[in-house]
Image: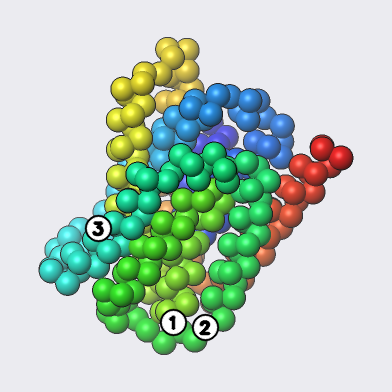
């Protein structure tokens, strides 16, 4: 339940929800970290499914407007944001998670990605959402692919890419949302299918359902955070938070092994 409640705000802010699912249990010595890797991944599927359903409700007007305005140019842009992370996930997701998914690796990714976000946010804010071109969509798609590394943050990576290309912060956040939602839905659907084929132990079904319900509720309740990021004058507070979280995690992990 606690991780489900954390999932909503962590998904809507550029702070890496997947990173929090690794670091928070590690920091507080929760038994969650002792679960089999496949069970933990399955639980994350349940959380992301709850988040995806809530986002469709919370952003329904925005999604409907985007669908009404869909034309060949916009369809091309959406494809360019979707294809790179989709192909990367199919080819490299498991190896990336095995090599970079440790708590130490995630903490380091939080620090590094937060620093890059802060640096990118120093770029001038000159471009609006209507200025987005195919090349911009491709760069954002590649940023989403880089976010397969746990702790990088899909939201953070796409905001970083958009700010590097000098988009205004509200435009950067809109581009990030429009790029992320199809990927979140596709990932939840694909991983859910894998989970269904593999099966879930009966004794864990209620816990998984509770986690998904908590993620759904926390995402709905946290939906005003979307406007908070839209209106942000700087992404530095998010970068500082990520740096602090990663640093505390590394210190605690090193203290245990010292």
Mark 1 or mark 2, which is nearer the start of the sequence? Answer: 2
As drawn, the label of residue 123 is 2
- What colour scheme has been applied to the protein in the rendered image? rainbow
Q: In whole angstroms, how far apart are the C-alphas of marks 1 and 3?
A: 24 Å
Question: At 46% across and 67% down in the image, what residue appears?
Answer: 159
Question: At 50% across and 62% down in the image, what residue appears?
Answer: 156
As drawn, the label of residue 166 is 1
Task: Evaluate if marks 1 and 3 touch, with contact meaning CB atoms under 8 Å apart.
Answer: no
Task: Evaluate if marks 2 and 1 touch, with contact meaning CB atoms under 8 Å apart.
Answer: yes
Rate crowding at label 3 as few (under 14), some (14 to 19) or many (20 or more) other CA atoms within 10 Å.
Answer: some
Look at the image and tell me in which quarter the C terminus lies: top right
Looking at the image, residue 116 lies above or below residue 213: below
Looking at the image, residue 37 lies above or below residue 89: above
As drawn, the label of residue 63 is 3
> Residue 57 in the image: x percent, y percent?
30, 48
> Residue 16 in the image: x percent, y percent?
53, 52
Q: In whole angstroms, how far apart are the C-alphas of marks 3 and 2?
A: 29 Å
- Mark 2 lies on a secondary structure that is loop
Q: Nearer the viewer, mark 1 or mark 3?
A: 1
One can see residue 45 in this view: yes
Residue 221 vs residue 54, the one in the foreground: 54
Mark 3 or mark 1, which is nearer the start of the sequence? Answer: 3
Q: In whole angstroms, how far apart are the C-alphas of marks 2 and 1?
A: 6 Å
- Mark 3 lies on a secondary structure that is helix
């Amino acid at each position: 339940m606690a991780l489900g409640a954390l999932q909503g705000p962590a998904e809507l802010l550029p702070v890496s929800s997947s990173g929090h699912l690794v670091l928070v249990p590690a920091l507080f010595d929760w038994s969650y970290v002792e679960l089999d890797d496949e069970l933990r991944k399955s639980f994350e599927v349940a959380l992301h499914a709850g988040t995806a359903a809530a986002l469709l409700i919370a952003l329904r007007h925005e999604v409907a407007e985007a669908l009404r305005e869909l034309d060949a140019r916009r369809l091309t842009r959406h494809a360019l944001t979707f294809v790179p992370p989709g192909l990367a996930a199919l080819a490299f997701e498991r190896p990336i998670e095995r090599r970079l998914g440790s708590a130490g690796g995630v903490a380091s990714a939080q620090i590094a990605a937060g620093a890059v976000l802060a640096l990118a946010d120093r770029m001038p804010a000159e471009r609006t959402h209507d200025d987005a071109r195919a090349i911009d969509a491709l760069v954002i798609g590649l940023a989403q692919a880089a976010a397969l590394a746990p702790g990088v943050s899909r939201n953070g990576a796409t905001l970083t890419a958009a700010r590097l290309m000098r988009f205004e912060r509200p435009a950067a956040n809109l581009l990030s949302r429009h790029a992320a939602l199809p990927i979140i839905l596709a990932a939840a659907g694909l991983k859910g299918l894998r989970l269904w084929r593999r099966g879930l132990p009966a004794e864990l079904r209620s816990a998984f359902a509770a986690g998904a319900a908590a993620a759904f509720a926390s995402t709905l309740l946290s939906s005003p955070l979307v406007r908070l990021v839209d209106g942000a004058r700087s992404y530095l507070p998010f970068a500082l938070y990520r740096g602090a979280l990663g640093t505390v995690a590394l210190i605690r992990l090193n203290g245990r092994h010292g």
